[in-house]
Every structure is written in structure tokens, then in C-alpha cells.
Image (tube, grey):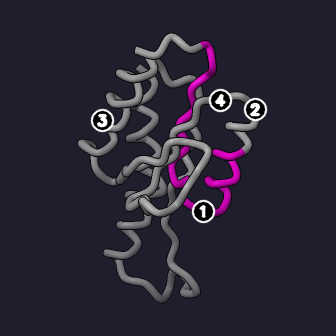
Amino acid sequence: MNKSKAPVALVTGASSGIGLITAQKLVEAGYRVFGTSRRPSPSESHAFDMLPLDVDKDESVAGLINRIVESTGRIDLLVNNAGRGLSPAGAEEFSIEQAQAIFNTNFFGVVRTTNAVLP
């Protein structure tokens, strides 16, 4: 277990956009950062650890949280950034299955990850 005093952050959806910038800013602020993506690219280089995570799956979330806690002893900050959208279509243009997939990621993914981190 890492006894480092650096705070530990988990940023979901850190492969691009707001998640990537958030992870980079947390590194600059002195955090040990774990970023996630459904399929992280092994060729990309980051100043933080990039790990695979599918927030739609209980076992993926539990496995990642256990891995981080086993190596660091804690998670001090969780940034739930993973999300799914459907563009450019509006709600009237997508199916119930597509809406359910969006809701599973954007709502239940946040609940699932938060419930796994808080204990």
C-alpha cells in the first residue's frame, strides 16, 4: 500500500474533453490521479494513470475501485465525468433502447461509482 500523503483522485471519462483537462489540473495541484476510459489507448501518454472502466457494469466499477484502494489505501476525490450522448439527434429522434443506454451511463453510472467509492 502506498503511504504517500498526496491526495488520490479518480476521474471517470478522462480520455478527452473536460475529464482530461480535470485530470491534468488535478495532477498539477498535487493529486495522484487515476483517469478512466472504456477503452484507454495504450499509445496515449498522460501524466496520470489511465485505466479501463465501464461505469455501466457493477463488476468493472468494483474491480477498479478495489484496485485503486489496494494500491493507494484510499480515494480522496471522485469526479464523475463519464457520459454518453446522442448527437446531433434530439430525444424525439432516438429509440427507447438508446435512451436507456444514455440513462444507464449518465445516471446509474454516477450512482454506481459513487456508491463504490464512498464506503
Secondary structure, mark 4, is: loop
**Hey, what amino acid is under mark 2?**
Ala
Image coords of residue 53 (percent x, y): 37, 50
Secondary structure, mark 3, is: helix
Labels 4 and 2 touching (C-beta < 8 A): yes
- 80 w.r.t. 76: above or below: below
**Hey, what amino acid is under mark 1?**
Ser
Foreground: disc 3 or disc 1: 1
**Hey, what amino acid is under mark 3?**
Ala
Between disc 3 and disc 4, whose residue precedes? 4
Residues packed near mark 4 inside 10 Å, few (<14), some (14 to 19) or many (20 plus): many
Residues in magenta, as a range: 5-24
Image coords of residue 56 (percent x, y): 33, 54
Between disc 2 and disc 3, whose residue precedes? 2
Q: Residue at x 41, y 47 (%)?
A: 51
Residues packed near mark 2 inside 10 Å, few (<14), some (14 to 19) or many (20 plus): few
Nearer to the camera, 114 or 10: 10
Foreground: disc 2 or disc 3: 2
Disc sitting over residue 29 in the figure: 2
Distance CA(mark 2)–CA(mark 1): 19 Å
Disc sitting over residue 31 in the figure: 4
Distance CA(mark 4)–CA(mark 2): 6 Å
Disc sitting over residue 62 in the figure: 3
Between disc 4 and disc 1, whose residue precedes? 1
